[in-house]
Amino acid sequence: MRAILVVNPQATSTTAGGRDVLAHALASQVKLDVVETDYRGHAMAVARSAARDGFDLVVAHGGDGTVNEVVNGLLADGADGTAPMLGVVPGGSANVFARALGLPVDPVEATHDLLTALEGDRRRRIGLGLADGHWFTFNAGLGWDADVVGRVAKWRGKETSASLYMRAAVRSYFRPPLGRPALTVRIPGEEPAEVVTAFVSNTDPWTYLGERPVHLNSGCSFETGLGLFALNGLTLPTVFTHVRQALLTKSNQRGRHLVRLDDVPLIRIDAAEPVNFQVDGDLVGQRTRVEFQSVPDALTVIV
């Protein structure tokens, strides 16, 4: 088996020693190349080349941003079932995708699990989301959550943490950088809905508050369509109600300001003015229209 290990040395919990241990362990089972990324988009370029060169496996060692880049590289030519398999050894601060797959967040434990999975040929086909040409593994969105992601991105140099995101959420709530332009959600077979912020999930939970999972669409998984969670108002009582529900185990979110659907194949969101757009926790830019599509069985993951 030919494999490439893609390491982001800037990720929160990646170290040179950990990288060497992981590379040595993998090299005992596969023919391995190791690449350390040194610029934004590097992991995507490496994964794209690996897919076109006929590699069997690409292992991402980094945070969710590294995993997202690798996935977008693997599927750069489409999800036709010929892409290399994906392996993940978490190295970031949140590691949402790895947790959603049930993988350990400790890199040493995750390495052991990956080797065991390779020995036993344990693999899983998962569905992904596709939004405006960008593949996402767990979540994408327009509005408040994207404003938070954009604010965190501006605070470069600060270590990413749950408290940092909480501060960014509070600031973005009281001082939205782009205001609150109206969003129109359009789903085939449903009446259009006017909202002010929208989360589109590919699995649940879609993020974590420290070690605590946050649930918005409890019926969403890697084997279903997309989940929509949108609010047509952001008053403090509305926000507190849904934050409380989100922190309950497998909560079924309810509320009069909530627009929520699970297992949706296609979602289109139009904005009255350009709004921030995020994919897997990275700000992509600003958009006035985004179409979100569920793509079943898009990728094989070693688990």
Image: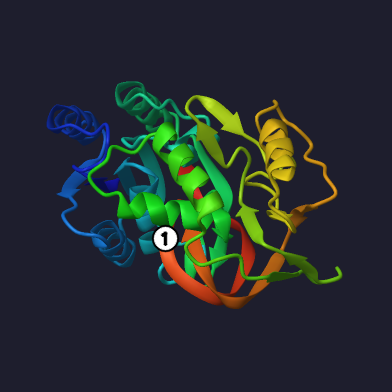
Q: Nearer the viewer, residue 121 or 137?
A: 137
Residue ID at (27%, 31%): 13
Q: Position of residue 234 (x, y in %)?
A: 68, 52
Query: Would residue 298 appear left or right of 252 to someone viewing this image?
Result: left
Q: Position of residue 144 (x, y in %)?
A: 56, 55
Q: Is residue 7 above or below residue 248?
A: below
Residue ID at (62%, 70%): 181
Residue ID at (79%, 36%): 252
Q: Nearer the viewer, residue 295 or 122?
A: 295
- Mark 1 packing: few (<14 Cα in 10 Å), some, or many (20+)? many
Q: Nearer the viewer, residue 154 or 224?
A: 154
Q: Amino acid at mark 1?
A: Leu
Residue beneath disc 1: 283
Q: Position of residue 299 (x, y in %)?
A: 50, 54
- Quadrant of the rendered image containing residue 51: bottom left
Residue 302 showing in the rendered view: no
Q: Is residue 167 above or below residue 182?
A: above
Residue ID at (47%, 62%): 177
Return the residue found at the far front: 174
Residue 15 showing in the rendered view: yes
**Circle 1 SS class:** strand
Quadrant position of the N terminus in the picture: top left
Query: Would residue 285 appear left or right of 227 to someone viewing this image?
Result: left
Please give the count of numbered marks on the rendered protein. 1
In this picture the colour scheme is rainbow
Q: Position of residue 206 (x, y in %)?
A: 57, 42
- Quadrant of the rendered image containing residue 296: bottom right
Q: Is residue 292 above or below residue 34?
A: below
